[in-house]
Image (cartoon, helix red, strand yellow):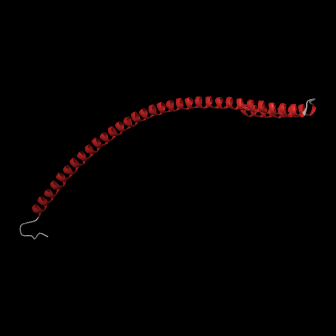
Amino acid sequence: MSEDSKSTGFAWFLAGLGLGALVGVLYAPKSGRETREDIANSAREGSEYLRAKTRAAAEQVGTLVEKSKDQVSTLVEKGKEQVGTLVEKSKEQVSDYVDRGRDVVDRGRAQWEEFVERGKNLVSDQTSRVSAAVDAGRQAYKSTVTPGESET
């Protein structure tokens, strides 16, 4: 915003300079030759003034560009450091979660193996009971059937 104000002020300055030169020419009690020389001198002075201001503005822009480059470089370095820190923290968290997951899987596997073992024992026990019941049923059948009767 202040740059716009400066350029507007500079434009008004140039307009005033031109208007002043014109008024000076109209009311000057000098000869045509002297007036032309004065106008030429004023034009040279104006162009030298513009060149000087242009150089100064270019130097200021160059200085601002260098400062901006330094600031951007500093911000980029800070950003890299922060990203590196975040990446390290993330790696630690992921590692922690992986370890927790392994612990849960190991506990689940141990419980599963315990349940399988209980199931095997239960099936074995039931198999023994059913076999004993079948054998008892055969013995009872054999003792109730007389030797001369037919087995069906």
In this rendered view, identify the residue nearer to me: 72 or 22. 22
The image quadrant that residue 57 belongs to is top right
Instruction: Using residue 136 as the reference point, say whether residue 106 is left or right of it.
Output: right
Q: Name the residue: 13% across, 62% down.
A: 141
Instruction: Using residue 149 as the reference point, say whether residue 69 is left or right of it.
Output: right
In this rendered view, identify the residue nearer to me: 110 or 14. 14
Q: Name the residue: 62% across, 30% down.
A: 64
Quadrant of the image containing the N terminus = top right
Numbered label tally: 0
User: Can you give x and y, in whole percent of width and height, for residue 87 in the image?
Assistant: 43, 35
Q: Name the residue: 37% across, 36% down.
A: 95
Q: Is residue 132 above or below residue 87?
A: below
The image quadrant that residue 55 belongs to is top right
User: Can you give x and y, in whole percent of width and height, for residue 38 in the image?
Assistant: 84, 30
Instruction: Using residue 140 as the reference point, say whether residue 111 is left or right of it.
Output: right
User: Can you give x and y, in whole percent of width and height, for residue 107 in the image?
Assistant: 31, 39
Q: Is residue 133 above or below residue 79?
A: below
In this rendered view, identify the residue nearer to me: 136 or 7. 7
Furthest residue toward left? 147
Quadrant of the image containing the C terminus = bottom left
User: Can you give x and y, in whole percent of width and height, for residue 49 in the image?
Assistant: 75, 29
Q: Name the residue: 56% across, 29% down.
A: 71
